[in-house]
Image (cartoon, helix red, strand yellow):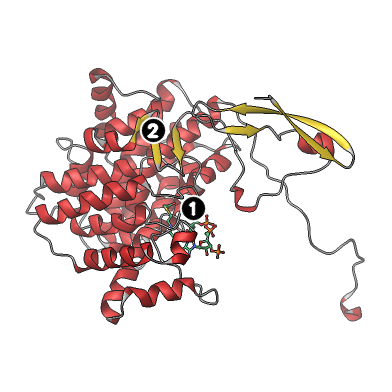
Amino acid sequence: MSNTATLNLDGKIYEFDTGIGTENEKYIDMAHLRSKTGYITLDPGFGNTGSCFSSITYVEGAKGILQHRGYPIEELAEKATFVEVAYLVIYGKLPSENELMNFSAGLKEHAPLHTNLEHHFSGFPKSAPPMAILSAMLNLVACFHPEVLEVTSDGEDFDKTATLLLSKVRTIAAFAYRMAAGKPINHPNPNRGYCGNFLHMMFSDPYQEFQVSPIVEKALNLFLILHADHEQNCSTSTVRVVGSSRANLFSSVAAGVCALWGPLHGGANAAVIAMLQDIKSSGRKPEYYIEKAKDKNDPFKLMGFGHRVYKNFDPRALILKKQVHKLLDELHINDELLDISRELEEATLKDDFFISRNLYPNVDFYSGILLRAIGIPLNMYTVMFAIGRMPGWIANWKELLDHKQRISRPRQIYTGENKRRYTSLIER
Ligand code: CMC
């Protein structure tokens, strides 16, 4: 294969280097296009733009492949814990027994929040969306640990910042829920693991510590693993863009939380359940919603369907679909929303609009049913996604600094007014 690409532009020939990734992904290096030719590439939504080299996660959309550091998601989902996967995603290798012990000890040590932070939670109105609280509190927590405001991507300082963030995000999420629900907060219990501790902080009562069922703990572990990273999606790209200005990890991730909040991204998991509830209460057939989603004059979309990269199936959705059935059986739950989701999926699989556009259920389609089954309230669903995505955001921020990547600064094509003169108020 030739290692240059030739561009014939305005009668001149230009050559650009091409390259190949470890999974045979091909690219043309256009970094010097503008300086060589005066042109820029135009790619709104960045569907064809590689913004970095990365060795964290590989996604092959046509084949439904997802691998973290080379390990298939199916294997990680079946065999690993979220803490192991977090270590793997951040540090690039599965931890040894000793490394895992130290990493877990750090997570335990950093779980409590500074007591002066507690009253900040009660400053939010009761109706405050937990995603707003999470994003705001991440920046606030960092103020109580000035050392994490240092920008460093290796050594003990980075290890501490990463562990602190991974651990405290879970405490912030649980405290936000307890405060909004008017319930006393539960401090972390150092004798519990990552998932069990979160469930305890969410659901223990003052006189009765929550008994964490191993089935529920396993389901939460699976949910978090399936969200651990997903290469250059909207929120991760946001973390990278913010981090490229050498903003600290906490502020970069707080921006990532805001990007994740939107219903086209992480907010879809709650939107799916709202949609399924709407189908149930309206008594309408799924076909009604399918027709609505196809109507170009209607902004409605089938939530939990479609993906920028997966054009065959989302492997995370396949794992979830199977596990959600098992979970509901094990917990003896009969959730009508699962039947509706199955009907909806089956109807789309027969519909030309969905077939021709390769629109299949994505990770958010079944994850809400899992969260419902383990008792997570609807307004916390996207927060759960954020907790799960933390390793990916941390790893991408670290990689960006390790690679000394330039500040992100896309170009645009200006389509506004040409130069004109200012007119005074009476002349207008
Ligand atoms: N319902 C109806 N039509 C859809 C849907 C949908 N969910 N998704 C895409 N389409 C149509 C879209 O209108 C377009 O039609 P046409 O070719 O006639 O203009 C065609 O399919 C191609 O879609 P696209 O606009 O190129 O898709 P995109 O890559 O810009 O957007 C998406 C991807 C995930 C934002 C979009 O599919 C969507 O809005 N889905 C619903 C929200 C959702 O489930 N989001 C979660 C994504 S996965 C996890 C995550 O990232 O958080």
Judge whether 352 appears above or below 376 on screen. below
At a point 49% along the width and 43% down the height, the residue shown is 236
Q: Are marks 2 and 1 in contact (CB under 8 Å)?
A: no
At a point 29% along the width and 58% down the height, the residue shown is 368
The CB of the residue at mark 1 lies under 8 Å from ligand 1: no
At a point 25% along the width and 29% down the height, the residue shown is 104
Q: What percent of the width, then of the height, locates residue 179? A: 27, 59
- Looking at the image, can residue 149 be seen? no
Number of marks in the rendered image: 2
Of mark 2 and mark 1, the one earlier in the sequence is 2
At a point 72% along the width and 45% down the height, the residue shown is 41
- Looking at the image, can residue 16 be seen? yes
Q: Nearer the viewer, residue 385 or 324?
A: 324
Q: Is residue 404 left or right of residue 136?
A: right
Pick the quarter of the image with the N terminus.
Answer: top right
Q: Which residue is mark 1?
A: 259
Q: Nearer the viewer, residue 368 or 118?
A: 368
Residue 181 in which image quadrant? bottom left
Pick the quarter of the image with the C terminus.
Answer: bottom right
Tag nearer the camera, 2 or 1? 2
Q: Nearer the viewer, residue 1 or 216?
A: 1
Q: Amino acid at mark 1?
A: Ala
Q: What percent of the width, then of the height, locates residue 142? A: 43, 40
Residue 65 in which image quadrant? top left
Q: Assign a secondary structure to mark 1.
A: helix
What label does residue 68 carry, if any?
Answer: 2
Q: What percent of the width, then of the height, locates residue 76? A: 28, 34
Judge whether 274 appears above or below 402 on screen. below
Q: Amino acid at mark 2?
A: His
Q: Assign a secondary structure to mark 2.
A: strand
